[in-house]
Amino acid sequence: MRSIAMYAAVGALVTPLVIGGAGLASADQGPRYEGTHHSANKHGGTSSKTKSGFTEDGTAYFVKVTKTSDSTSRTTSATSSHA
């Protein structure tokens, strides 16, 4: 009886790992990077996000978006590249 409970427990732990591992393998599109930066003080704030990598068909991409605000204005700047 003890070995049946052990096999059931091991199966319950291993199954999600196997399913999750298969999902990771199919979602791999090559090297990629994503970074964010946020800051704020009493005069305003800024937020930026940078992403790069490859699409499913192997196309390289790069995107950087920066948003800044203060008490009188807001700005957004974006740069992107696709090869």
Image: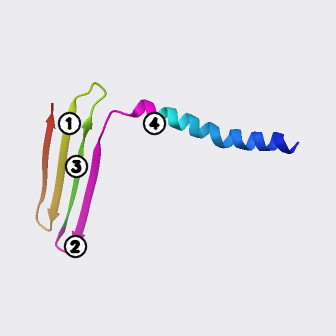
How many callouts does the rendering have?
Answer: 4
Quarter in which the N terminus is drawn: top right
Q: Position of residue 78 (x, y in %)?
A: 14, 46
Q: Which residue is mark 3?
A: 50
Residue bearing mark 4: 24
Front position among marks 1 and 2: 1
* Residue at the disc numbered 1: 61
Rendered image quadrant of residue 63 = top left
**Residue beneath label 2, please?**
41
Side of 71 where 37 appears, left or right: right
- Residue at 32% across, 35% down: 30
Gap between marks 4 and 3, in whole Å? 22 Å
Do labels 3 and 1 touch, CB within 8 Å? no
Label 4 close to label 1 by CB (< 8 Å): no
Q: CA distance from mark 2 to mark 4?
A: 39 Å
Q: Residues within 10 Å of mark 1 (few under 14, many from 20)?
A: some
| Residue 73 vertical position relative to residue 42 in the rendered view, above or below | above
Q: Amino acid at mark 4?
A: Leu
* Residue type for callout 1: Tyr
> Residue 11's x, y, as percent?
70, 38
At which x and y percent is residue 43?
A: 16, 73
Q: Disc 2 or 3, which lies upstream in sequence?
A: 2
User: Reading the chain from its start, which is encountered first: label 1 or label 2?
Assistant: 2
Marked residue nearer the N-terminal end (3 or 1)? 3
